Image: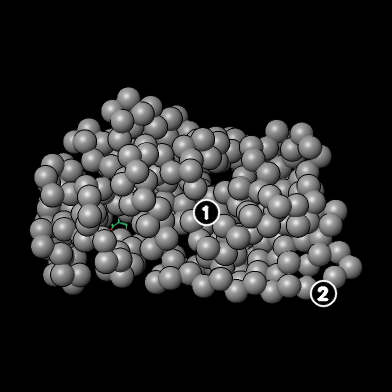
């Protein structure tokens, strides 16, 4: 696999951004795009210089030239789209939120394991150079054992009830779209929480629009997290221990910069630029795994995806958000 050939599933905003990043990689080629409509696929292909446009997920999955599919449709459809691609023998990188719930995620992971196919959640945050450096510093004991994580992802958007952020049928709400980042950040720092407490105000459609979460860990650590679609939040994060703290400015989940404040020392500012739009790093990781014959990425392991989905199930249970069919 000298050049890895990508198929893009869906034609929306993030599909375009990811495609732009793939073009920056000399060992990647976007050979096809698939959409629910051939017109949309054709228009996307023309815009991005892609050779083939398919009018269904199944046709894209059956394209013999495609090594790996990037699934970038709305989260209600991730499960069916990923299953279609895996069933056709394709490797898959699937956008966050990986699925609507943990049960769907577990089925996809089991299927990939049985068929010996690569599968990865597109949790780009975990692949970014600055975030990887933070993990390295924390593991080296720079701030001591973590006692607290704070993280927010609140944005104020003026969207109607049909928008994917508000539509329960599309897996809407702040939690799956935005809250997945603070939760994944807390998970990266502290692992799976032993206790989850949450509260949310819901939209008239029944998805969360302003959500607070408190996680407790057996070590005694806590995580205080928030997300919202009606709040112009700081979108910052910090991780603290007895020897100091690390502060991530907004937007923390894709930051190039952070500050290490060791107790009784001058602050150290790190600047570790991401490349392209930042999505390139997860693509590089997926291609490295494919070349090495791995089924899952050590940077975004299946267990992390499953645990984060499980936490979001718990938060939705406590806040009263159910998706159609659940
Ligand atoms: N990593 C990131 O930074 C990031 C940023 C934004 C979003 N995302 C995630 O990426 C996904 C897409 O977000 P987006 O911002 O690109 O959304 P978007 O611009 O609304 O595009 C979503 C695409 O999904 C397809 N779609 C729409 N409704 C659908 C339905 N009912 N069933 C199946 N497919 C449907 C459409 O593609 P076709 O018409 O071609 O089928 C549409 O173009 C979401 O899971 C979101 O959470 C990630």
Q: Earlier in the sequence, mark 1 or mark 2?
A: 1
The residue depicted at 19 percent of the width and 65 percent of the height is 44
Where does the C terminus fall, quadrant-wise? top left
Q: Position of residue 321 (x, y in %)?
A: 53, 41
Q: Is residue 243 above or below residue 56?
A: below
The residue depicted at 53 percent of the width and 40 percent of the height is 304
Q: Nearer the viewer, residue 116 or 174?
A: 116
Quadrant in which residue 197 is drawn: top right
* Residue picked out by circle 1: 126
Labelled pair 1, 2 in contact (Cβ < 8 Å): no
The residue depicted at 41 percent of the width and 56 percent of the height is 282
Q: Taking the image as drawn, is residue 168 in sight?
A: no
Q: Position of residue 235 (x, y in %)?
A: 61, 65
Quadrant in which residue 166 is drawn: bottom left
> In the figure, is residue 204 to the left or right of 115?
right
* Residue picked out by circle 2: 266
Q: Secondary structure at mark 2?
A: loop
Disc 1 residue crowd, few under 14, some 14–19, many 20+, Cα 10 Å: many
In the image, farthest residue toward the top: 114
């Amino acid at each position: 696999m000298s050049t890895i050939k990508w198929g893009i599933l869906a034609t929306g905003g993030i599909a375009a951004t990811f495609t732009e990043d793939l073009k920056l990689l000399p060992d990647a080629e976007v050979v096809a795009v698939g959409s629910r409509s051939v017109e949309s696929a054709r228009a996307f292909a023309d815009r991005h210089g892609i050779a083939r446009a398919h009018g269904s997920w199944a046709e894209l999955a059956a394209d013999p030239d495609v090594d790996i599919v990037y699934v970038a449709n709305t989260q209600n459809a991730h499960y069916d789209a990923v299953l279609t691609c895996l069933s056709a023998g394709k490797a898959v990188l699937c956008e966050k939120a990986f699925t609507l719930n943990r049960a769907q995620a577990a089925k996809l992971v089991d299927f990939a394991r049985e068929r010996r196919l690569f599968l990865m959640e597109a949790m780009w945050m975990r692949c970014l150079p600055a975030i990887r450096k933070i993990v390295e510093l924390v593991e080296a004991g720079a701030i001591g054992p973590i006692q607290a994580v704070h993280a927010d992802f609140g944005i104020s958007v003026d969207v109607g009830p049909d928008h994917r952020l508000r539509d329960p049928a599309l897996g809407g709400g702040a939690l799956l779209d935005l809250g997945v980042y603070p939760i994944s950040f807390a998970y990266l720092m502290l692992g799976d929480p032993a206790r989850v407490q949450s509260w949310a105000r819901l939209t008239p459609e029944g998805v969360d629009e302003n959500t607070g979460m408190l996680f407790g860990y057996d070590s005694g650590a806590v995580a205080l997290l928030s997300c919202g679609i009606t709040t112009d939040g700081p979108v910052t994060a910090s991780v603290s221990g007895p020897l100091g703290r690390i502060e991530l400015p907004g937007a923390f989940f894709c930051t190039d910069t952070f500050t290490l404040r060791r107790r009784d020392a001058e602050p150290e500012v790190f600047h570790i630029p991401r490349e392209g739009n930042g999505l390139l790093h997860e693509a590089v990781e997926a291609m490295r795994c494919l070349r090495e014959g791995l089924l899952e990425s050590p940077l975004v392991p299946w267990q992390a995806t499953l645990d984060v989905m499980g936490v979001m199930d718990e938060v939705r249970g406590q806040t009263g958000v159910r998706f159609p069919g659940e």
